[in-house]
Amino acid sequence: MAGFAALMYFPALDGCFALPDVPSYAALLCDMLAALGFLWTYFVLKANTFSASTTQIAEGQTVISKGTYALVRHPIYADGIPLIAGISPALGS
């Protein structure tokens, strides 16, 4: 959560202190990193159709062990890492 909160503060600090611009090659790399995070989210939601913001028990629900869940137990949290790392520099902050 702290990383996502920082996403709001870094652009503001950039505007206040006129920090140097992000090089175009770094912004492009971060664009790809953020896109990878969104793609990872797509695969998580495709593997687990019961994904929701709150935990619930549903009829026919089973433990998912395929797709991204075979790599990490909580992949929806893991996809926050490339998103947090890539979004601010991709936007030039």
Image (tube, helix red, strand yellow):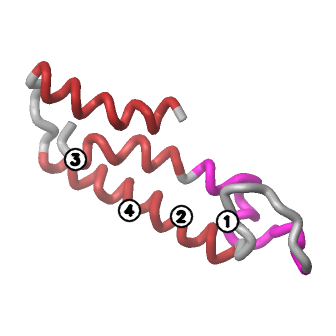
Side (left or right) of 86 relative to 19: right
Crowdedness of circle 4 by 10 Å Cα count: few (<14), some, many (20+)?
some
Q: Which numbered circle lies on residue 68? A: 1
What is the x, y in percent for residue 71?
A: 71, 59
Q: Residue furthest top?
A: 17
Q: Which numbered circle lies on residue 40? A: 2
Q: Which residues are magenta?
A: 60-78
Q: Nearer the viewer, residue 49 or 69?
A: 49
What is the x, y in percent for residue 47?
A: 69, 74
Quick one: quadrant of the C terminus? top left
Q: Helix or strand or loop: what does disc 2 sit on? A: helix
Q: Helix or strand or loop: what does disc 3 sit on? A: loop
What is the x, y in percent for residue 84?
A: 43, 42
Is mark 2 in CB contact (under 8 Å) with mark 1?
Answer: yes
Residue corresponding to mark 3? 91
What amino acid does circle 4 point to? Ala
Q: Nearer the viewer, residue 17 or 59?
A: 59
Crowdedness of circle 1 by 10 Å Cα count: few (<14), some, many (20+)?
many
Residue corresponding to mark 4? 35
Q: From mark 2 to mark 1, how far is it between C-alphas?
A: 8 Å
Q: Magenta segment: does it hold 11? A: no
Q: From mark 4 to mark 3, how far is it between C-alphas?
A: 13 Å
In primary-sequence order, the first of circles 2 and 1 is: 2
Q: From mark 1 to mark 4, how far is it between C-alphas?
A: 16 Å
Q: Is residue 33 above or below residue 9?
A: below
Q: From mark 1 to mark 3, how far is it between C-alphas?
A: 28 Å
Q: State the image quarter where residue 21 is shown.
A: top left
